[in-house]
Amino acid sequence: MNNFTYWNPTKIYFGEGQIASLKDEIPAGARVLITYGGGSIKKNGIFDQVTAALEGITFFEFGGIEPNPHYETCIKAVEFAKQENIDFMLAVGGGSVIDATKFIAAATKYEGNPWDIMTTFGGAVTGAVTVGCVLTLAATGSEMNPTSVVTRAETQDKLFFNSDYVRPKFSILDPKTTYSLPPRQVGNGVVDSFVHVLEQYVTYPANAKVQDRFAEGLLSTILEDGPKALSEPENYDVRANLMWSATQALNGLLATGVPGDWATHLIGQVITGFYGLDHGQTLAVILPAVWQYKIEQKKQKLIQYGQRVWHIQETDPDTIATQAIERTREFFETMGVQTKLSDYGLDAKIIPNVVAKLKEYNFTQLGENADITPDDVAKILELAL
């Protein structure tokens, strides 16, 4: 296990009714910008809970943030925040709303070209408006990490940045806020959180017994409760365990002392930028193809995963590794998320575009061993067809 430092200052309020805790976290005299997506929070009662908790506090609204948040939309929010002297931002939504709000918070304080924040992967950020969150979709873990992913629709660029300046000060996780989600979002969220764990687990052995068991516990929980969230959408215990699993999957704790892969995410983000697929859809397509292509390098961890999480009883190592990949693919499809590019009307014609964009970003050494080149990506995409 590698040396590591871990620190996460995000305060978590977890459980039913915790939105009322907002009154304890928003400073008196703050000028708050509430950010949200398509407006479902005004139909399901969440917005009313938020505004009730903000009684006596000056707040403004900015809605319309897309599922893959657009840079162009975020810039409009930045202009509004500057105009109204916003000094606190409250994201009410899923990962896309939170990611957008992180960017808005950083860009509001940035004097240069806001796109610099993305192209420097956060290196240009020197401050940000304080961010708090009310989570309504268990998926990305953005509520407890310093990462944001934003798409520039004009140029079809989807990039990420990291900065502790935008790590949420607090996040409120009430599982009941996820009851009204459509099945597509539930399925995507389960896939997203599952893959977050896998990209920090199916790499190579690192003598990280605690992290491995932690990962296996999260994976087993998501496997058990993911399908139940589709069949029993108002099962509080199911929603609670999925919500907490998604947060734990990407708050940094699981990553401490172990290698990470992230090739699937980086390839998937390019596909989303070009072709508009949901983030979860790209992960379900690319992860099995990466594993298939890198099966020899990943075999030890694939076997461990197959035996401990899927309880595969085979004795042949190759069979265990292959079955682990196939069972993962089947799980994604059980969640309603298809696993081939052809399922989304895409074919081999996309490969040159994806490879060229990765080269443009200088994402030319992907994976836990930094040995997935653009040529390798082309072969992985062929396996994903």
Image (cartoon, rainbow, N blue to C red):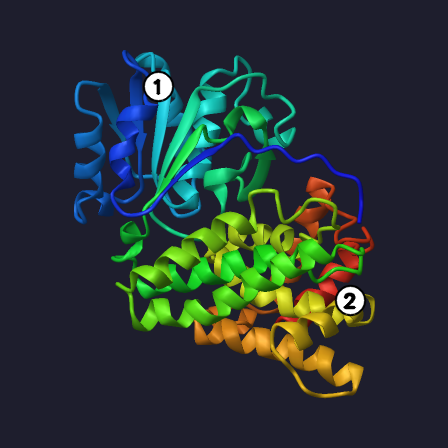
Tell me: 382 left or right of 147. Answer: right
Label 1 SS: helix
Residue at 63% across, 32% down: 121
Residue at 83% across, 55% down: 371
The amino acid pointed to by label 2 is Lys
The amino acid pointed to by label 1 is Ala
Seen from the viewer's position, the closer of residues 280 and 312 is: 312
Tell me: 27 left or right of 6. Answer: left
**Corner quadrant of residue 42:** top left
- Location of mark 1 (residue): 81
> Could you tell me how far apart the alpha carbons at marks 2 and 1 are, in whole angstroms?
47 Å
Relative image position of residue 344 (x, y in whole percent):
48, 68
Seen from the viewer's position, the closer of residues 196 and 214 is: 214
Q: Is residue 144 above or below residue 292?
A: above
Mark 2, other Cα within 10 Å: few <14 / some 14–19 / many ≥20: some
Task: Report whether residue 49 is seen.
Answer: yes
Residue at 65% across, 25% down: 123
Label 2 SS: helix
Q: For the C terminus, which image quadrant?
A: bottom right
Relative image position of residue 327 (x, y in whole percent):
59, 78
- Give the number of the mark in front: 2 or 1: 2
**Corner quadrant of residue 29:** top left
Residue at 53% across, 78% down: 330
Task: Report whether residue 152 is seen.
Answer: no
Closer to the chain start, of discs 2 and 1, is 1
Relative image position of residue 368 (x, y in whole percent):
77, 53
- Location of mark 2 (residue): 298
Seen from the viewer's position, the closer of residues 105 and 28 is: 28
Relative image position of residue 260 (x, y in whole percent):
71, 51
Q: Are marks 2 and 1 in contact (CB under 8 Å)?
A: no
Residue extending furthest front? 210
Q: Residue 151 got which mark? A: none
